[in-house]
């Protein structure tokens, strides 16, 4: 093809994509750039910013300065929120994997017709409003909810267990809402799996645990990585689930960011925290593309 | 699967049990929520007989009505706008070979999927609040533009998938019969592409209808949608009214998704 032909092709492509790109530039890509800029400005008196260059917002992410003598120390409050977010997101990933792997395996080993139905049953919660699912799990773990009522009626406990408004509630909630995100990529990986390999393993006297560890898990690794990223990333940025189930005290990064734009009235600090979260998430995604590129035998 | 009947290698110990437990755990809370939306009693805790009372109350509640109307207006606009621009973008980025900057277009279109929603919400809050102060306009347009933008990748993906699976010979034939590019698009490409467009529009509609975080940050006073109204109700005593609204939204989502699966299945 001639160079001129190439160029007109590209021009047409850009022209057709232009309306979408303008929309995204105005209401998605562009505003992100403003957040990056705001994170390097000084905070305004009530909200907003003053257009003075400052590293204060980033400094405050990790450190705090004493109001009286100006001594610098680590910002314990921030660190405990980061630690809780990382810990809960990791725990959510592990928990969804523990339930997700057998579920995906079960679906992938059904006959084609039944498989389509089971898969649809996983897809419905996936597309159901996150808030509705969070409400639903709240109804179950409340003090007068399904779980406590059942346990009391069975005589196992006399007083309801306080689960709601604890870290455990946030963990249960996130595992509940993000489970389909783990199951779907695991299913895709297992679906391509050649079960003759298991037969071969058994023929060579491998135990079931060895089959799982040495044959199945290495082969479905891309699915495991994809599922883990798909669960970990939204968990880390979660806002609705910790707000509803954590009850304001058990904040995660997402709620902490909101606080800076609400009561905290420190927009630059909120902007810096947003950028930090964005960098971590993009880092995880880049890591994922690297790993999946390595797993791809043709890549 | 007949080949495994003698010794089923696909079975791993405990896997089936855990899988069934997972499905029960996934559905039990949703089923409870739906069942309690038909509770005739006044409390969320005690069952007081079957009734449509809470649906009637929600229906008569002005705040709920306003939020429902707003949710639908935004979702309809967002799905129309995002599907239109996504269709053009899909036509521009498929079936014309690779060109310079294609990766950049992909990254820009898929960005809303990669960035945590709270970060997008904060970004839009900063940007739109400045514009609101500058122009004095505080209408629904901000929400419609924001929703349209984050719906673009959801509309784009099924349309692109459909385009990539399409045979170009029909369009070549049309061109051979002296159809001009517009006629080819209008009478050949678009009808073939329609299932993908409809699927994309449905996904965009559901995604817009369900959005909480971005709406919560972008909306002006008195612009609650159904999800942000429900989030606001959390601060007060919970009534089965929220269950009724949730169930209605849930039913709508399941309906649209079923239609979506039927449409995309028919492609072959």
Image: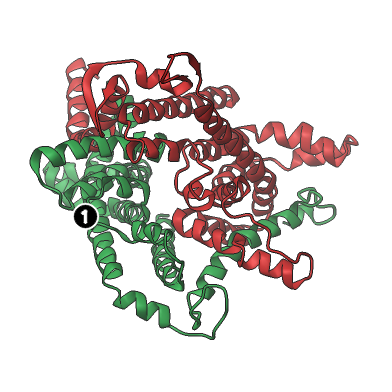
User: Is residue A203 found left or right of B146 in the rendered image?
Assistant: right
Q: Where is residue A120 in the image (x, y as percent from the top left)?
A: 53, 59
For the colour red, the matching chain is A
Q: Which residue lies furthest to the front in this view?
A: A68
Q: Position of residue B259 (x, y in %)?
A: 39, 64
Which image quadrant is residue A115 in?
bottom right
Which chain contains the residue that carries disc 1? B
Tell me if residue A38 comes above or below residue B84 in the rendering.
above
Q: Can residue B98 be seen in this view?
A: no
Q: Position of residue A204 (x, y in %)?
A: 88, 34
Which residue: 46% across, 72% down?
B240
* Residue where numbered disc 1 is placed: B77
Which image quadrant is residue B114 in?
top left
User: Is residue A188 found left or right of A129 in the rendered image?
Assistant: right
Q: Where is residue B76 in the image (x, y as percent from the top left)?
A: 24, 58
Q: Residue furthest left?
A: B135
| Quarter of the image that includes the N terminus of chain A | top left
Which residue: 53% across, 75% down?
B35
Which residue: 39% across, 77% down?
B55
Q: How many residues crowd mark 1 within 10 Å: few (<14), some (14–19), many (20+)?
A: some
Which residue: 54% across, 84% down?
B48
User: Is residue A103 found left or right of B9 in the rendered image?
Assistant: left
From the viewer's side, name the closer residue of A43 and B188: A43
For the colour green, the matching chain is B
């Amino acid at each position: 093809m001639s160079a001129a032909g190439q160029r007109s092709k590209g021009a047409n492509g850009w022209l057709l994509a232009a309306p979408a790109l303008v929309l995204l530039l105005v209401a998605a890509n562009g505003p992100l750039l403003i957040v990056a800029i705001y994170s390097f400005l000084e905070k305004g008196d009530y909200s907003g910013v003053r257009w003075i260059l400052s590293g204060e917002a980033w400094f405050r992410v990790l450190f705090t300065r004493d109001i009286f003598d100006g001594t610098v120390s680590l910002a314990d409050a921030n660190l405990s929120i980061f630690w809780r977010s990382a810990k809960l997101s990791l725990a959510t990933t592990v928990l969804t994997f523990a339930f997700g792997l057998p579920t995906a395996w079960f679906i992938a080993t059904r006959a084609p017709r039944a498989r389509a139905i089971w898969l649809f049953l996983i897809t419905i919660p996936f597309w159901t409003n996150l808030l509705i699912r969070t409400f639903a799990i709240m109804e179950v773990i409340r003090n007068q909810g399904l779980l406590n009522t059942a346990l009391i009626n069975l005589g196992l406990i006399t007083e309801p267990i306080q689960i709601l408004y604890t870290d455990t509630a946030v963990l249960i909630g996130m595992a509940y809402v993000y489970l389909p995100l783990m199951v779907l990529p695991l299913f895709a990986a297992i679906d391509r799996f050649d079960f003759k390999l298991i037969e071969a393993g058994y023929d060579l006297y491998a135990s079931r645990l060895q089959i799982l560890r040495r044959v199945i898990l290495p082969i479905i690794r891309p699915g495991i990585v994809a599922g883990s990223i798909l669960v970990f990333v939204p968990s880390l940025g979660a806002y609705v689930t910790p707000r509803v189930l954590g009850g304001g005290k058990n904040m995660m990064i997402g709620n902490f960011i909101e606080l800076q734009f609400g009561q905290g009235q420190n927009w630059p600090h909120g902007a810096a925290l947003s950028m930090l979260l964005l960098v971590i998430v993009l880092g995880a995604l880049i890591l994922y593309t690297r790993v999946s590129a390595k797993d791809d035998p043709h890549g | 699967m007949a080949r495994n009947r003698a010794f089923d290698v696909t079975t791993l110990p405990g896997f089936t049990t855990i899988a069934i437990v997972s499905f029960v755990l996934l559905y039990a809370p949703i089923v409870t929520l739906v069942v309690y939306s038909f509770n005739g009693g006044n409390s969320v805790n005690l069952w007081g007989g079957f009734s449509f009372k809470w649906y009637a109350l929600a229906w008569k509640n002005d705040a709920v009505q306003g939020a429902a109307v707003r949710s639908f207006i935004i979702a309809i606009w967002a799905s129309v706008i995002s599907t239109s621009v996504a269709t053009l973008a899909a036509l521009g980025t498929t079936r014309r070979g690779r060109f310079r900057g294609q990766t950049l277009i992909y990254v820009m279109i898929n960005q809303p999927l990669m960035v945590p929603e709270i970060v997008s919400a904060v970004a839009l809050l900063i940007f739109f609040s400045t514009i609101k102060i500058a122009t004095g306009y505080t209408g629904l347009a901000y929400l419609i533009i924001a929703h349209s933008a984050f719906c673009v990748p959801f509309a784009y993906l099924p349309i692109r998938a459909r385009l990539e699976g399409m045979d170009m010979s029909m369009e070549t034939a049309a061109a051979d019969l002296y159809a001009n590019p517009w006629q080819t698009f209008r009478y050949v490409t678009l009808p073939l592409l329609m299932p993908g467009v409809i699927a994309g529009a449905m996904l965009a509609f559901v995604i817009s209808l369900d959005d909480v975080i971005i709406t919560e940050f972008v909306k002006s006073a008195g612009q609650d949608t159904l999800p942000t109204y429900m989030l606001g109700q959390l601060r007060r005593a919970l009534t089965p009214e929220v269950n009724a609204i949730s169930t209605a939204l849930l039913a709508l989502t399941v309906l649209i998704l079923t239609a979506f699966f039927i449409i995309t299945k028919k492609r072959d």
